[in-house]
Amino acid sequence: MLRCEVCEYHNEGAVEKCPKCDSPKEKFKIVEDEKAKLIEMSRKRNEMHVAIMGLYAKVQKWATTIKEENLDPACVVIAKRQDAS
Ligand SMILES: [Zn+2]
């Protein structure tokens, strides 16, 4: 990520001049901190997504088992709630 020091415009790749303020390419500096932060945020989101999908698959499997084996009524109520979602 590159940032124009004059107007704060951000660009992924190199530029000849700033499209926003026309400053020359020498005014663009690499923003490593910001890039690292974005990568870390993306990594966390992906990690949560995978964890949630894994839990969701387990919940669906448990709900099926609870209904098939007709476990105690409180469990069946929770399992049927799963059908509504
Ligand atoms: Zn600029």
Image (spheres, grey):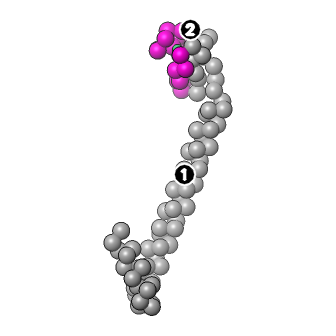
Q: Earlier in the sequence, mark 1 or mark 2?
A: 2
Instruction: Determine the residue positioned at 49% across, 11% down.
Output: 21
Q: Position of residue 42 (x, y in %)?
A: 56, 45
Circle 1 residues within 10 Å: few <14, some 14–19, many ≥20: few
**Is residue 14 among what the camera can see?**
no
Across and down, in percent, residue 73 comes to 41, 89
- Give the residue at x 52% y 23%: 11
Give the amino acid type for the residue marked by disc 1 in the picture: Asn
What is the quadrant of the N terminus in the image? top right
Which residues, given as a range, are shown in magenta?
7-23
- Say whether residue 63 is magenta: no
Query: Which of the numbered marks, if any, corresponds to residue 69?
Result: none
Q: Which residue is mark 1?
A: 46
Between residues 55 and 75, which one lies in front from this camera angle? 75
- Disc 1 element: helix
Residue 14 in magenta stretch: yes
Q: Which residue is mark 2?
A: 24
Q: Is residue 12 above or below residue 27?
A: below
77 lies above or below 19: below
Residue 18 lies, in percent from the top left, at 51, 13
Report whether residue 17 is seen.
yes
Q: Residues within 10 Å of mark 2 (few under 14, many from 20)?
A: some
| Residue drawn at (64%, 23%) of the image | 30
Tag 1 and tag 2, C-beta contact below 8 Å: no
What secondary structure is the stretch in magenta mostly built from? loop
Cα separation, mark 1 vs mark 2, equals 37 Å
- Going 36% across and 68% down the picture, which residue do you hit? 85
Left or right of 40 on screen, residue 82: left
Q: Amino acid at mark 2?
A: Pro
Q: Residue furthest front?
A: 74
Quarter of the figure with residue 75: bottom left
